[in-house]
Amino acid sequence: MSTAAPVWEIARQFDFGAPLREVRTHGGGLINDTFLATLDTTPPRRAILQRINSKVFPQPQQIMQNLRVLLNHAQHSVSQSSASLQIPSLYLTFSNQDFVRDADGDYWRALQFITNTRALDRLANPTQARNVGRALGGFHTLLNALPVQQLHTTLPGFHIAPNYLAHFDAISTRAAVDADAATACEFVATHRGLAAVLEHGKHSGALPLRATHGDPKLDNFLFDAHSDRVVSLIDLDTVQPGLIHYDLGDCLRSCCNRSGESAHDPAATRFDLELCSAILHGYVDAARGFLTGPDFDFMYDAIRLLPFELGLRFLTDHLAGDVYFKTQTPGQNLQRARIQFQLTAHIESNEAAIRSLIAELR
Ligand code: GN1
Ligand code: MG
């Protein structure tokens, strides 16, 4: 379905180097609105257009600044591991800006469409998994050479799990918790102690603040159209200071859950150890140059925390009336939360195996 005039009016302010042919909605992100612009060239070229969700990102112009810092850093980086990863560049407007503001004050930006790639719904084999790990490790290696103070915190509080827990507590005392949500709330009650584990590591000085991606879920890795190679890591809005453990945990909770974030039967959710092993191997191969002993010490905690944290965020949003994550049906955020909690439980039941995988990699 083609979109209505306002999106077109935004798109035509960017200098794509060719006239626009069409603009359509694109992708399944839960926060921003994404569109695919097709240009009138032969063969047709494409570009990505996005409206940044200003309810989520308080200062969208900081996202653009971070992206400029990152692109500039990547251009001048000599690191081999990261050189192969493409970072989508920005289009400028005809008045030389890298964003457009619409009548509501929302920010729009246009990004390079990385060609000859595909996103995967699920990983099909350990080679793909290893390449995902390598790509994340390569991205971290690239970021590690960037002084973290050069980046803005585009999303304050992102991945600070104790804050999500405090927000849950506030909402769950106010909201009517239906019987459906009660079991999920009990899961939170039995896992409260887990929330602060990475923050403790940070505050004790064991885990340094580094630049992170923030959202390295499977569909943000673009694979070569004809091979299992990863060519790009996209969705750079949450590149900001944080812990690499957020990324590692988030990547694993997404990639090792073969039935996905919106499966029909939450109880069937599993954490795939073979994929986990391949991702960790690829990651450590690429990131070994900067990883420290404490980084390894906290890996298992990160793997267990991130699905719990996302489940907590989904559950809180369900109780708050679906105000943060986009939904199509009522109860969808509760269902998403159950899946993440089941994943957490399955990780816990495999603790010994996961810890021994990590031990092998040291
Ligand atoms: C959100 O918008 P999207 O789909 O890229 C969320 C992530 C979650 C993810 C779960 C800024 O990402 O933290 O892991 O949904 N992004 C933000 O699918 O909250
Ligand atoms: Mg995202």
Image (tube, rainbow, N blue to C red):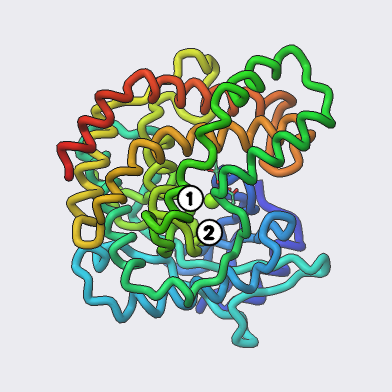
Decide if residue 180 is on the left or right side of residue 262. right
Image quadrant containing the N terminus: top right
Image quadrant containing the C terminus: top left
Q: Position of residue 82 (x, y in %)?
A: 26, 65
Secondary element at tag 1: loop
Q: Are marks 1 and 2 in contact (CB under 8 Å)?
A: yes
Secondary element at tag 2: loop
Please name the amino acid that badge 1 sits on.
Asp
Q: How many marks?
A: 2
Task: Judge by depth and name the residue closer to the eye, 279 or 124.
Answer: 279
Instruction: Identify the residue under disc 1.
Output: 215
Q: Position of residue 259 (x, y in %)?
A: 43, 24
Can residue 138 be seen here? yes
**Residue extending farthest bottom:** 95
Q: Position of residue 197 (x, y in %)?
A: 47, 41
Task: Judge by depth and name the residue closer to the eye, 163 or 49.
Answer: 163
Task: Using the image, tell me which numbered label, if any, was put on residue 7.
Answer: none
**Residue extending farthest front:** 204
Instruction: Identify the residue under disc 2.
Output: 238
In the rendered view, tell whether residue 111 sits above or below residue 206: below
Q: Residue at x 43, y 62 (%)?
A: 209
In the rendered view, tell whether residue 48 sits above or below residue 13: above
Disc 1 C-beta below 8 A from ligand 2: yes
Please name the amino acid that badge 2 sits on.
Thr
Q: Residue at x 39, y 61 (%)?
A: 208
Decide if residue 30 is on the left or right side of residue 178. left
Q: Quadrant of residue 157?
A: bottom right
Q: Residues within 10 Å of mark 2 (few under 14, many from 20)?
A: many
Q: Position of residue 332 (x, y in %)?
A: 66, 27
Disc 2 C-beta below 8 A from ligand 1: yes
